[in-house]
Amino acid sequence: MKKYLKIILAALVALMFVGTFVFLYMKSKPQPVVYDEFTVKTADISKTTVVTGTIEPRDEVEVKPQISGIITEIYKEAGDKVEAGEVIAKVKVIPDMGQLSSAESRVRLADINLKQAEVNLDREKQLYEKQLVSAEEYDNVRQAYDQAREEKLAAVDALEVVRDGVSSSNASASSTLIRSTISGLILDVPVKVGNSVILSNTFNDGTTIATVADMGDLIFKGNIDETEVGRLVTGMAMKITIGALENLKFDASLEYISPKATDNNGANQFEIKAAVSVPQGCDIRSGYSANAEIELESAKGVLAVPESAIEFSSEDTYVYVVKGTGEEKTYERRKVVTGLSDGINIEIKSGLKKGEKVRGPQKVKGE
């Protein structure tokens, strides 16, 4: 029994030895090299670039007060639509004490002059009725009275404007009512009731009551690298993609290319702007991030092969044309003239015919 066990064990060891030898021999045996093959065909090739930017309204207006004061009422909020001239807020005037004192003094002086002119007119009228003075003298005194009366009215109006921000004679054009200067959508109302506001003057820009924009006239604003800006011309078609809108695409037309570069993290870039065509019913918000795809060059219906099939040697390009089939298959190295490339396919201007096959990269085992 022990003799049979020894024989079986020796047979197993011999079998393992032979199996290992065969395995190592097969592994060391050179494997045939296999390549991808591509057929020459016609295709449309275009070279594009993608510019990152934002969607903004073409006209964005900051509405500022005509007087300084305190906000007492706000009638609109961000997101509301307004028409030109519509009231957004109301301001209570805080009068300048120097201007107020001067206006009050003007009213008092005008009142004194008016009373004196009225006395002079009554006296002159009595003399005129008795034919003791000429009509010309009477007319001069009456004109002086009219002028004094107008001065009193003007002084009162000026006092009301300084004190209240509006006079009784022009209440409809009150400067205490802050009105939108354009029709559009209110993007922001940065003030609250009780905030102090100042009017725009030589020394400051004034307080912004609201920002209003026409959201029906939008533009794409972005920056393009200096290596590509030379291929752009105004009027070029663009495709705008807004990620926040589930990758919807909109048409756009390039209308502005900055003549001056700006330094963006060490790279010279030029600002571009394009008019965006927004379909009816599509809600676009100001400040959306967007990508603009611009076609820089294109070649339609040309012969093309994958760029991976091209061998670049100095300034020349070559392909390996497939000859024969099966074990008789060979590859003929042939010079070709290439054209436009989109990074995947490349145009073949000469050297190949439609339907010919060319060798691609070597296949990796297991593919």
Image: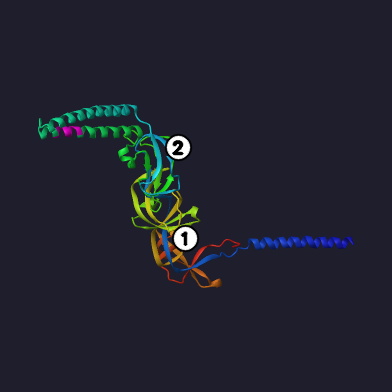
Q: Dot 2: within a 10 Å radius of its alpha carbon, few (fewer than 14), some, or many (20 or more) residues?
A: few
| Mark 2 vs 1, N-terminal side | 2
Helix, strand or loop at label 1? It is: loop
Residue segment shown in magenta: 139-145
Residue 88 location in percent, x, y?
40, 43
Above or below 52: residue 123: above
Quarter containing the N terminus: bottom right
Helix, strand or loop at label 2? It is: loop
Residue drawn 36% across the image and 58% down it: 236
Above or below 256: residue 365: below
Q: Amino acid at mark 1?
A: Ile
Q: Nearer the viewer, residue 182 or 278?
A: 182
Q: Nearer the viewer, mark 2 or mark 1?
A: 2
Q: Nearer the viewer, residue 181 or 261?
A: 181
Q: Is residue 313 visible?
A: no
Q: Which mark is residue 193?
A: 2
Q: Which residue is mark 1?
A: 344
Q: Nearer the viewer, residue 57 or 149?
A: 149
Residue 311 location in percent, x, y?
46, 61
Q: Quadrant of residue 316?
A: bottom left
